[in-house]
Image: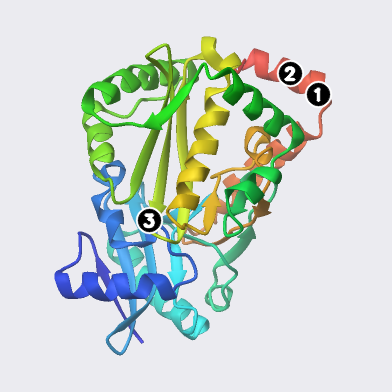
Amino acid sequence: MNWEIITKYPDKETEEKWFDFMPTSTFPCHYTSPGFFAEPFFEDKNPFAVLIFDQKEIVGVATGIQTDKKILCGLEVRPQVSIAKRADHRAVANAFVEALLAMAAKNDAELVSLNCSDEIKGFEEKGFILKRAKGTFEVITLDLRAGKEAVFKGFSQTRRSDLRKAMREDKVQISPLENLEELAELYEIHVGWCERKNIVPDTWETMKKVFALKNYHRIFIAKHLGKIIAGSYFRFYEKSLMEYAANNSLVEYQRLRPNDLLTWRSIEWACEQEIPFYSMGGSHLFLRRFGGTPVSSYRYQLDRTFLQKHRKKEAIADFAIKTYQSLPVEARRRIKKILGKT
């Protein structure tokens, strides 16, 4: 096998081979497709893709970014590694390691990290440490192949009741975002939401670029009396996977259940498009009430520093999280209040 690293959208020949690879692969999603290079979120983060070839055929893809001396292929809740199902996965893993170590040496990277949807033999033999996602880092995944009625029956009783009530009252209308005027109205909600969460909002230009990527993105909005009160953002790859990406909403309208309705409409849309699987992108309570199955990802990480500083830092953080989670509910509530998280 041989490998190639690219840092921009592929040429026509490679693009065709890449698209041919997608339906044969273990994790066909937007970010393991050529469309990854069209994403505005990564424009300033040195995006790349490692392509593994068996003869002239692509049998493995890993996409990622290079930032702060780190090579990162996805997140625990968002794998970005896919391998042809029929390929020798160990051989593909060995080729990934060779390519990524060459990249790390060239760029003096301290940390190399790959997040995979499946456990893959070969990485650990090369010194990579395996960490399986657990708890809050698992992802609720829905199987849509039985149809939307069957999926709805799998929701929690509370979720089904809330949705039926909201649909019966008909105070909120759900629709795809259709124009820049609606996007501008939703963008104001996005900025306000980010201010409440104390995070930096995406730029207006970024939002416009996302809206334009209709082959990979869908934005659904919720309106009450003609006013946009919430919006949810989704990634998808045709007939493969729909992914819940983000939500912005106005707090004062939460009682109308716009986010429940937005998610349900996106599930309906995915069923209409014959997309078989739907990733919730997380596993907190709001998402768990849509049923589905918690799915783990597998992270393979190589700390190239002399004293393993990244592994040690993560171990301390993991210990702190476990300690916090072991505290009584009231103690955790007080800590959140002190930290300004409420």
| Amino acid type indicated by mark 3 | Tyr
Please give the residue where the numbered disc 2 appears in the rendered image.
333
CA–CA distance in space, label 3 to label 1: 38 Å
Q: Quadrant of the C terminus?
A: top right
Give the side of residue 162 with respect to residue 148, left or right. right
CA–CA distance in space, label 2 to label 1: 6 Å
| Amino acid type indicated by mark 1 | Val
Task: Using the image, tell me which numbered label, if any, was put on residue 329.
Answer: 1
For image coordinates 24% across by 51% down, the residue present is: 38
Q: Earlier in the sequence, mark 3 or mark 2?
A: 3
Task: Using the image, tell me which numbered label, if any, was put on residue 108.
Answer: none
Query: Looking at the picture, how far across and down is residue 193, in whole percent?
Result: 44, 19
Query: Looking at the picture, how far across and down is residue 149, in whole percent?
Result: 62, 47
Q: Do the CB atoms of the residues marked 3 and 1 lie less than 8 Å apart?
A: no
In the depicted view, which residue is nearer to us: 161 or 59? 161
In the depicted view, which residue is nearer to us: 111 or 263? 263
- Vertical placement of residue 288 versus 225, above or below: below
Binning the other alpha carbons within 10 Å of mark 1 as few (below 14), some (14 to 19) or many (20 upward) gives few
Q: Nearer the viewer, mark 3 or mark 2?
A: 3
Give the side of residue 26 with respect to residue 336, left or right. left
Give the side of residue 86 with respect to residue 144, left or right. left
Q: Do the CB atoms of the residues marked 2 and 1 lie less than 8 Å apart?
A: yes
- Vertical placement of residue 102 versus 42, above or below: below
- Vertical placement of residue 97 versus 270, above or below: below
Query: Looking at the picture, how far across and down is residue 161, in whole percent?
Result: 71, 28
CA–CA distance in space, label 3 to label 2: 37 Å
For image coordinates 58% across by 54% down, the residue present is: 147
Please give the residue where the numbered disc 3 appears in the rendered image.
31
Query: Looking at the picture, how far across and down is residue 334, in whole percent?
Result: 73, 15
User: Tag 1, which secondary structure?
Assistant: helix
